[in-house]
Image: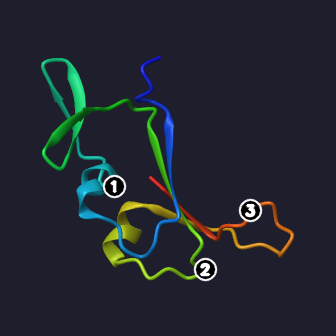
Amino acid sequence: QDGYGSPFLLHGVDEYIDPVIDNVLEKNIKVAQGRTFIVLGDKEVDYDNNFRLYLNTKLSNPKYSPSVFGKAMVINYTGKQKCVFSNKVVIML
């Protein structure tokens, strides 16, 4: 396997999410000459439909823009102190 379909976790994300990943958030996937790719900044990166991006934050009530909430699934899994998860929110794309 080439690794493009593997999940990717960004850990410790704050309230600012760099617009360079907007194409990933929007799933703005392009196909040209049999190649599936996504544009990140000025680079074309091969894309696999099995790819998943997870953004993780310790913020218990992050103030993301409405556009981020519109492009992603935000899951708050705050638990008791002895919870296995020490982090608060995961954004799944």
**CA gap, disc 2 to disc 1?**
21 Å
Nearest to the observer: residue 37 or residue 66: 37
Q: Closer to the N terminus: mark 3 or mark 2?
A: 2
Check if mark 2's residue and mark 1's residue have beta carbons within 8 Å: no
Q: Where is residue 23 shown, x and y percent of the image?
A: 25, 51
**CA gap, disc 3 to disc 2?**
13 Å
Q: Closer to the N terminus: mark 2 or mark 1?
A: 1
Q: Residues within 10 Å of mark 1 (few under 14, many from 20)?
A: some
Q: Which residue lies most toward the right here?
A: 82
Q: Where is residue 77 shown, x and y percent of the image?
A: 68, 68
Check if mark 3's residue and mark 2's residue have beta carbons within 8 Å: no
In what element is the residue under mark 2? loop
Which of the 4 image quadrants contains residue 90? bottom right
Per the image, the residue denoted by label 2 is 60
Q: Residues within 10 Å of mark 2 (few under 14, many from 20)?
A: few
Q: Is residue 38 left or right of residue 62?
A: left
**CA gap, disc 1 to disc 3?**
24 Å
Residue at coordinates 27% horizontally, 57% vertically from top-left?
22
Per the image, the residue denoted by label 3 is 85
Residue at coordinates 24% horizontally, 57% vertically from top-left?
20
Per the image, the residue denoted by label 1 is 25
In what element is the residue under mark 1? helix
